[in-house]
Amino acid sequence: MTPAIRTEGLSKRFGDIVAVEHLDLQIAERAVFGFLGPNGAGKTTTVKMLTGLSRPTEGRAFICDEEVTQSSVTVRRNFGFLPDVPAFYDWMTGEEYLYFAGELYGMAYPNLKKRAAELLELVELKKAARRKVGGYSRGMKQRLGIAQAMLNHPKVLFLDEPTSALDPIGRRDVLDLIGRLKEEATVFMSTHILSDVERVCDSVGIINQGRLVVTSTVEELRTKYARSIFEIEFAEDAAPFIAAVEPLPWFVKSDSVLVNSSPTLRITTRDVAAARKELPRLIAGSNLTLLRYELTQPSLEDIFVEVVKGS
């Protein structure tokens, strides 16, 4: 299957400063891809090259197998774009703004009217369609910007930091919308808000100091960076169980901690696979009342910090 987005050695330099260096990406169709990195890592520069707003120093980018150039008009029909700080004409209504954007796309009025109505309903702005944009909240403006980017039925949608300045309710609404958009398009979302990525993204790429460090699904990252700590909670004293576990070759140490005000046994191992096989048997043979048993999972924030520091 042809990737929706592909780059080959994509690079951008500003004098002696390397903003993006030899970026190689392949992003599948109908997926939400989270492009992660700390501020200044090269995320916005990458988006500008992918959308033809900035000429790469080296390398090439392709959208739906068509090369992105600053002069190409046809490739722009394949994608929509919401910048990190979208600008609106505050004196227009939301409906008028979509009509204006649709005319720039060359859309005929009957089709444009129908598409604008569909999108205003999709982004939950139908009731506010005839209100002036100047009276919209920041979250409403972001949703209107996404509707504008979707007007021409794009195959790829670029969203640059779409939730960075929103309050919790605005973020929730925009993320719910992004999760639905992959039914129509591939979504490329650059962000530094890791909880957003955990919520909506199918796969992620982490960039640091202009270099792509890793690309993977969120679940594959969690598996790769899985911690070797098991949390076990018993109704009784766990001392007999600890005595049975300590002599085993995969055992490293045990600690008693409070998790949500409950006494919990934490067992650190050097071999997760062996511990996962043997611990359930040992628990069953202990005759203790098991309340909770869990292999701790690292958050995406933990993984991000580890990957960035390692790079």
Image (cartoon, rainbow, N blue to C red):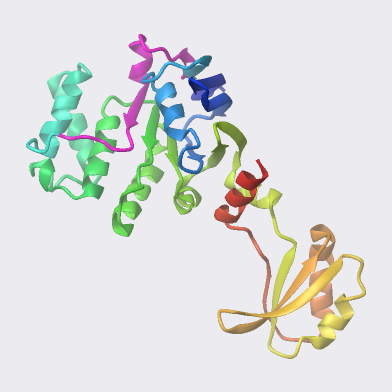
Give me the residue at 66% from left, 64% from top.
296
The residue furthest front is: 16
The answer to whether any part of residue 242 appears in the image is: yes
Give me the residue at 56% from left, 27% from top.
25
The residue furthest bottom is: 236
Instruction: Count the labels in the image.
Output: 0
Position of 221 compared to 182: left or right?
right
Position of 137 compared to 24: left or right?
left
Point out residue 310 in the picture as x, y percentages from the top left corner.
Answer: 67, 45
The answer to whether any part of residue 2 appears in the image is: no
Question: Quadrant of the rendered structure where residue 155 is?
Answer: top left
Position of 180 compared to 91: left or right?
right
**Image quadrant containing the C terminus:** top right
Relative height, residue 255 to residue 208 (above, below): below
Relative height, residue 302 to residue 10 (above, below): below
Position of 61 compared to 238: left or right?
left
**Image quadrant containing the N terminus:** top right
Point out residue 158 in the picture as x, y percentages from the top left corner.
Answer: 39, 31
> Observer-nearest residue: 45 or 120?
45
The answer to if 118 sits in the magenta stretch is no
Point out residue 103 in the picture as x, y percentages from the top left corner.
Answer: 16, 20
Q: Where are the magenta residues, as a range?
A: 63-88
Point out residue 189 in the picture as x, y percentages from the top left corner.
Answer: 43, 38
Question: Quadrant of the rendered structure where residue 59 is?
Answer: top right
Relative height, residue 1 to residue 123 (above, below): above
